[in-house]
Each structure stands twice: as C-alpha cells, then as structure tokens.
Amino acid sequence: MVAITLPDGSQRQFDGPVTGTDIAENISKSLAKKALAVKVDGEVRDLFDTIDKDASVEIVTREHEDALDIIRHDTAHLMAQAVQELYPDTQVTIGPNIEDGFFYDFAREEPFSSDDLAAIEKRMNQIVEEGRPTRKEVWDRDEAIRHFKDIGERYKAEIIADLPEGENINIYFHGDWHDLCRGPHLPSTKHIGKAFKLMKVAGAYWRGDHRNPMLQRIYGTAWANEKDLKAYLHRLEEAEKRDHRKLGKEMDLFHFQQEAQGSVFWHAKGYLIWRQLEAYIRRQLDADGYVEVKTPQLLDAKLWEMSGHWGKFRENMFVVPDEIPSTDDDAPILTGEADLMALKPMNCPAHVQIFRQGIKSYRDLPIRMAEFGCCHRNEAHGALHGLMRVRQMTQDDAHIFCREDQLGEETKRFLDLFARVYKDMGLTDIAYRLATRPEMRAGDDASWDRAEKALSDALTAAGLEFDIAEGEGAFYGPKLEFHLTDAIGRTWQAGTFQLDYVLPERLDASYVDESGARQRPVMLHRAVFGTFERFIGLLIEHYAGRLPLWLSPAQIVVTTITSAADDYATEVASALEAAGLRVELDIRAEKINYKVREHSHAKIPVIAVVGAREAEERKVSLRRLGSKDQESMLLDEAVQALRDESRAPDLKRA
C-alpha cells in the first residue's frame, strides 16, 4: 500500500506504486485535465513518474507557484524543436530559464533574422496545437554520447562527456524530437499554451568563453496565460519609455563615453539632482547623530589583505602598482616589482582606521560614521548598464560602531530612517528580506547565530514582515535587503544594512568596557540610497523623468505668448528666482504651442505662460506637466505657492 497525503491533510490509499496522473484522476477528472506536474515531498516531478512509497503530494496546475518555471522550460524545448524543423543544419546547445523567460543557444552558420523569429514562433504555435506527447527515457552515459555524436550534435555530446562516468542521462522526447534534460516537463506540448513570444537574437560564446565558437542566442518569454503575457509586454513598453539612459539624454542630465567606461559624465542639470539628494540625506544624517568623514580612495593592498577583501573581492578591484611609470620609450612602463595598492571598492576598512585613532570608551558608543565615498569596482564591460551598473560610484555610506546591547535600538533607528526617506522619495512599496550566512564566510557559527538573531529580532520588534534569503548574506555577516516596487511593478534592490562581527576583529578595532577590559565593537554597514548613480537612475525610471518639483533641475519655465510680454516675463522669472526657484526664461519668437510641447518633452514640471493680458493683470497662467489645464494666479500668489511646493519634503515638515 502507498499512502498519499494531500495539501488539505487528507489521505488516499493505493494498492501499489502510483503516478501523479493516477492521483489526479483519483481526485477528479477535471483536475486530471488541468494537471501539469506533481510535487512529491517538496520536489517537482513529471506526472508519469512512479511514486512507490508514502508521500506528501501536490498536483501542480497552471495556478501553482511552480507551474511557470516548468512552462518556460517546456517553451524553450518547443523553440528548439521549431528551430531544428525549420533549419535542420542547426545544433542545439543549452536552453535554461531566466528571469521572465528563457533562452536557447544555437550553432548555425547563417545568422537568425527578425523574419526567422516570426517563422519560428509560428511553427511553435503549430507544434502546440499538435499536442506532441512527452516521455522520458534514461540512457547510459556512453550510449548518450555516441547517439548525439551520430546525429551531429557535438555540443550535446560534449556536455554529457563532462558528466561523471557511470551517470545515467535523462532524455526527454516531445514527439520524436528529444534532448537531454533534468526535467520535469509538461505531459504534452498542448499544455504549454500560446502565452509566449520570442524577443530577440544575441551572440554568446559557447560556455561563456571567448576562445570558443560564437553561438546565436534566441531569447523568449512565456507566461501561464495571455493576460500575464500582455501585462509583461506592456511593462516592457513602459520600461523602454522610462529608460533612464534615453531620458537622461533628452533631459540633458548625463552621458557616457568609451574613454571612461562605466563612469558618468554628469551635466549641470543631472548634478543638480545629485546635489539636492545629497543635501537632503545629509540633513537626515545630521539630525540622526552621524558624523561625516572623508577617507582616501587609494589604499595599500596590505590593508585589503587584513580586511579579507583581497582574497574575496580582488577580481572586482582596480589594482595599482605603487611606482612612478617610466617615460623611457625603450623601457617597460612598469617594472612589475612594485608593491600593490587598490582603489577602494568600499569604505568600511578606512572607517575602521578612523575608529582606531585614540582610545574609545563604552560611553562613546554608538559612533555613527558617514561618508559620501567615491568607490571603484572593476565590472566587466558587458555587465555595465547606464547608471544602474557602473565602475565609479558614490555611496551614501555609513558605519555604526556599537555595543552588543545597542544592536536592537540601532537597527530600529536605521529602519525608521530608511522608511522615512523612501516615503519622502515617493517609494513606499518595500519588501524586507533577511539574507543569512553564505557557504563561504568569515567568522564562527556562534557569531553568525547572534548576528542573524539580532537582525531578525529587530525586524520583528519594528513590526515588519520579512522573508529569509538563505545563504545570500555578505561573507562577513548577515544583511537586510530592501526590495522596492516601482510605478510599473518592477522590483529594485536599494539600500543595505549589514551586521558585522568579523571586520572589527580582523582590523583590531576595540573599545574599553565598564571594567576596563578591551571589547570588540559590533560594526553595522548601512546605506540608504545605496549609490547616488543607481538611485538617481531608479528615480528617473520610477517617475518617467517627471521628477517631483523639489528634485527637478529646472522647476519652472516662464514663456511668452507674444513679444509684447517679454519685459513682464523677465520680471516674473526674476521674482521666482528671488524666491529660490530654479527658473528658465523662454522669450523666443516661436508659437506658444511649440514652446509648451518642447518644454513638456524636457520634463519641466511647471510652465508659466504670460501674454499681454497676464502682463496687464499681473498674473501668470500655470500649466503642470501632463495636464492640459491651466490655472491663472496673481504673480505674488504664484510665487508663494510655488516656493512652498518646491521645498524638500523634510523642510516642509520643519
């Protein structure tokens, strides 16, 4: 007998081994029709797999949390089938799931075109309609290698040859087409549905190695239903409109160029946004008891060795020999014998050096040490992405040195600061996550136990719900992650809070306790924005360039309907500037509709339109970005209203 326990706690008895299909049919015929896979004791398996012992079982349908991963996996196979049927000379290599979809790498002499993608997608739909059944065979490793070599699939044969000798290989068939795969898969191609779309073609080296042949990668997306696919495509369309790189150019905020890969050229308007954010966050830090410091960018490799970053993080550091380069044409520029230094990828070891100057008492703690520190990380060129992934960045970084008994209060204090700042920024949909010890880590288990419990207790005390991210902490301690959902439903990770017992030990930071004994402080690494670059990119995309008035580089443009109002327009602009507003004046001899359209495209929040009537009545007509309506106000009233509205959120509260 095999006892099957269902999610509601009920049990069903079977005379012998049973499959997921048998269980679904035993429950109801309608469930059997909807079944995609079966989850046995937490493991998702094929419906036709045999269950030969007592188990807890869930039937996976389209609505199940595990369904989408299987659908995307099958859609990748579906695409590979269609490609090989349309282009028989093509070899398939690997085709994993990725966020929001999947890809498959193909070896083919002729490049794929957009017309090819349309043909492949059409063939995929036909294969779905055919409902090709899925079956699984288990082959001997050597047999599988011979088979794939015989049919000209040398990449598949190479993958299998890298597996341990004696290992059996799962081969999945969808009709006659087959591929090696870990599974599980849907019962037939019909179960995939038609909520998929092929997105683009890109190049990719075999196994990511530039010494290997270049393959063609086709990306696709797949969803459980047409509604979700349509919503995803709409999000992509919105994301394209909101792309900070595009808006940054249109709004004249910043640019990138080849001579400084991964570093930002901030234009005056873009840097004005930066300065507003920096002034805002500095006011928050001053009010919250932080001291601000400044530390060197270039530090001896010995310090990074002591901190542990040299061994864990060196590949992402810019390493600099400590010598003067030769200018002799016949000599090497560098000898290769000098001691090494590195541009700092983070500020924490330098802050410990400041803490270590002089003797610290338990009464001195906590010390909250902040720095707008410029850091460098040697990111691969292909990983760079506008403001979101750069090589030179500035963090709104700080480190809190505290006693163990102060941990809870300091964590709560930061959580309050974080929530207040993000509310001011218009970002209120925040998910909290506690990232725990990774496999490769510094420190003993007892320290990690204390650190993880301290953060968990602080989140609970603050009344915040949170998820656990197993194994995703920093190498020196657990961390809190803050995941924000923006205006179009995308999730961003911003800010950080990490608890560290390790670095004070490695760098010999200590304080004197009540009894006169030396103790190690607890070190809290924290940032609210994260980096200014990424946070500004996030804000641009969240607001689609329509930044709040207090952050906008140009807050108001005064423009004329007729040249007869030029003098009055100049007076209006001067009055607004005197009130502290950032003003542009447009008295060009252009039609007013043209000027309004141009300034709206530049994302100016307020357009003050003046003509002969406004000049006579000493009024302005205010048009808000995104609105076709105008509001007529007396000049003095408009100046007062706009001055109040343009103040930063924290100053409005003051």
Image: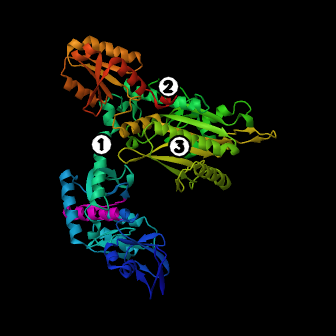
Q: Which residues are magenta?
A: 70-96
Q: Observer-nearest residue: 314 or 634?
A: 634
Q: Circles 3 and 1: CB distance less than 8 Å?
A: no
CA gap between label 2 and label 3 equals 43 Å
Res 194 → quadrant: bottom left
Dot 1 amino acid type: Glu
Depth check: give the residue in front, 633 or 179. Answer: 633
Quadrant in the rendering for residue 309: top right
- The label number, if any, that marks residue 496 in the structure image: 3
User: How many numbered tags mark residues here?
Assistant: 3
Question: Residue placed at 35% from the left, 53% from the top?
Answer: 212
Which amino acid type is shown beneath numbered disc 3?
Answer: Thr
Q: Which numbered circle lies on residue 326?
A: 2
Q: Is residue 224 above or below residue 395?
A: below
Tell me: 592 left or right of 654. left
Q: Secondary structure at mark 1?
A: helix
Identify the element where label 2 is drawn.
loop
| Precedes in sequence: disc 1 or disc 2 | 1
Q: Earlier in the sequence, mark 3 or mark 1?
A: 1
Q: Which residue is mark 1?
A: 240
Magenta-span inclusion, residue 80: yes
- Look at label 2 and name its amino acid: Ser
For label 1, the crowd category at 10 Å Cα-Cα, with few meaning under 14, some 14 to 19 and many 20 or more, is some
592 or 491, which lies in front? 592
